[in-house]
Image: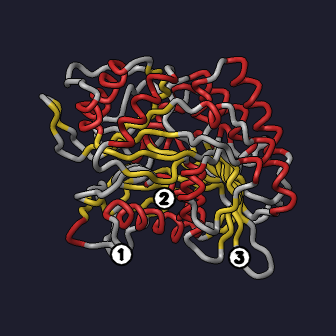
Amino acid sequence: MDWSSEHLPSDESLQDCRVNACVDVVLSGVKLLEALGLSPGNGKDHTILHSRNDLEEAFIHFMGKGVAAERFFSDKEAFHDIAQIASELPGAQHYVGGNAALIGQKFAANSDLKVLLCGPVGPKLHELLDDNVFVPPESLQEVDEFHLILEYQAGEEWGRLKAPHANRFIFSHDLSNGAMNMLEVFVSSLEEFQPDLVVLSGLHMMEGQSKELQRKRLLEVVTSISDIPTGIPVHLELASMTNRELMRSIVHQVFPAVTSLGLNEQELLFLSQAASGPHSSLSSWNGVPDVGMVSDILFWILKEHGRSKSRASDLTRIHFHTLVYHILATVDGHWANQLAAVAAGARVAGTQACATETIDASRVSLRAPREFMTSHSEAGSRIVIDPSRPVAEWHREGVSFHFTPVLVCKDPVRTVGLGDAISAEGLFYSEARPHY
């Protein structure tokens, strides 16, 4: 589990505190499966992977849809064998991994920002971390937690399979992050570090734990968040999940305790399905997620589980990102600078995917809808995007929405960590107003 935090002392260096960390081994999914002696068969989703065959079926299932996913691999020995083969394959690269660690790395690239990372940090991860990322001694461990990131390109073929989009499939046998072993270390470090922002992630890693441990640790998470001094925003970054009961518990227990959420289209629809929200009868998105439907679900989350006069909840902000557009939804009166925040997130999506310093117009394409309805649950308005002012804004019962298209990289160098970079950039430009 990932926690990180930031703090803004008098010298204007920002400190950020996070939990959930690992080493990402990034490589071609097809090359790994071929190295494992697997051949392309029929795709099938597995909520938990128990074998190499499960891995092959799940990878094919998601590669065929071009959809990102993350799964827990239950067999420790089998996973370590696969991880060793993956690490030694030509072209395999090792990066900082874990949502919180990735967001922390993004912040630490700014020399004025200081980041406290509380997660299981092994020797390889420690070596990869930025100098501005501080790790408490209690977070250091002798062995790294590895996550395998199997990437594929748009149009890549394997047997009869052809990927419609570039994306990745992630799997791990990560019990340290799943059990949130660094939770208490994190809380005890907060008083000395005095952060201005706390980022929490890794709740999805609990899917590998028993129901009893999930219940126990979720209660401890909420208690720990309540111990964070009032006025410090807490951002929760979600990730791919399959356990509806766990997601429902997170919605009801954790959402009211955090200030901000970051999530993508898969997580948004699964959340609505798990908690009986709008459009929950939809089994999956058909191509680009419909803006009006996304807007309805974001509005429902903030209205049903966010801050209001009648509800004791701190949740006032959701940063939604999908491949071709982003939406920042905020409860009025709690946030400022939303236009810059959502635009900055879209900009970093284009530059990081293409590995360029600035947007290279020859390497990106505009695939967002040029016009859309802002709702399907009620009589929404029709918005036509103005190229000279691409961030569109609309309002609905005390909630403001800021929409921006994304200039999508045509030949992405690396897709992993994009959502974390988007959320980090959006948070960097967001201005939290004090709660009254």
Residue 358's label in the rendered image is 1
Give left or right: position of 436 versus 249. Answer: right
Q: Nearer the viewer, mark 2 or mark 3?
A: 3
Q: CA distance from mark 1 to mark 2?
A: 15 Å
Residue type at mark 3 is: Ser
Reading the chain from its start, which is encountered first: label 2 or label 3? Answer: 3
Residue holding disc 2: 422
The residue depicted at 86 percent of the width and 61 percent of the height is 192
Could you tell me the amino acid type at mark 1? Thr
Spatial separation of the CA atoms under disc 2 and disc 3: 21 Å
Q: Position of residue 194 (x, y in %)?
A: 82, 63
Element type at marker 1? loop
* Residue shown at 68% from the left, 68% from the top: 114
Q: Mark 2 belongs to which amino acid?
A: Ile
Residue at image mark 3: 13
Residue farthest to the left? 160
Q: Quadrant of the C terminus?
A: bottom right
For mark 3, give the secondary structure.
loop
Q: Residues within 10 Å of mark 1 (few under 14, many from 20)?
A: few
What x and y, as percent, mark residue 424?
A: 55, 60
Q: In what quadrant of the picture does the N terminus appear?
A: top right
As drawn, 297 above or below 193: above
Image location (x, y in percent) of residue 54: 36, 19
Residue 102, picture quadrant: bottom right
